[in-house]
Amino acid sequence: MPFGLKLRRTRRYNVLSKNCFVTRIRLLDSNVIECTLSVESTGQECLEAVAQRLELRVTHYFGLWFLSKSQQARWVELEKPLKKHLDKFANEPLLFFGVMFYVPNVSWLQQEATRYQYYLQVKKDVLEGRLRCTVEQVIRLAGLAVQADFGDYHQFDSQDFLREYVLFPMDLALEEAVLEELTQKVAQEHKAHRTIMETVCILAFSLWGFS
């Protein structure tokens, strides 16, 4: 290195200047976005920037969380400066966006974009095993999810694409033959939902998560 300079290793922020930094946020659809913030910006300001990207009119149902140094999920304290909060507690400066508060009834969610984020959260919780359900319930929910995400059954020449789509909870250990049988049942469930609007399927799926 020229002139014998030694650079001290720092945390992996993408730093634009002494007064700004870029942090990454993983959304509920698994996409990752970046937000440019002041070093004095609060968690709430970051949340509002994410909400703007997602066209959410309200933010109070949602929050940001991170993995602590002990690998525990921890919600961001939104009123505090975000960078200092992450420096002190986070394992790395990667945030996760998610539903923080569930309303008593999904009908309270007036905006379609809000309902869609709740749908993504409930689907994620089912697939990752946080919301427990029977095999029959999994099939029904998978049929709704396929209709919501892909549209009507008749648009596809075959249902082979379902084999590449995550339909069942990760902790549901299935033999190959059983998996194939259940996938065919999901295809029939999907067929039964033809002509049902995406928004209706999203609402129905979300309602299950509130029950």
Image (spheres, rainbow, N blue to C red):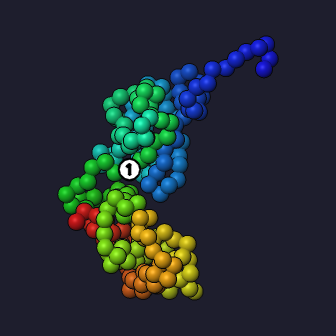
Query: Residue pushed farthest right?
Result: 2
Location of residue 9 (image quadrant):
top right
Q: Nearer the viewer, residue 164 or 14?
A: 164
- The residue drawn where x is 35% and y is 44% is 63
User: Can residue 158 be seen at all in this image of the molecule?
Assistant: yes
| Residue 87 drawn above or below residue 136 | above
Q: Is residue 144 visible?
A: no
User: Is residue 182 rendered to the left or right of residue 15?
Assistant: left
- x, y percentage for residue 109? 27, 58
Q: Residue furthest left?
A: 104
- Residue occupying the point 37% across, 61% down: 129
Which residue shows up at 49% across the image and 32% down it? 37
Quadrant (top left/top right/bottom left/bottom right) for the C terminus: bottom left
Point out the residue furthest to the top here: 3
- Give residue 128's position: percent from left, percent from top: 40, 60
Judging by the rendered image, the residue that carries numbered circle 1 is: 98
Q: Tell me which amino acid carries mark 1.
A: Gly
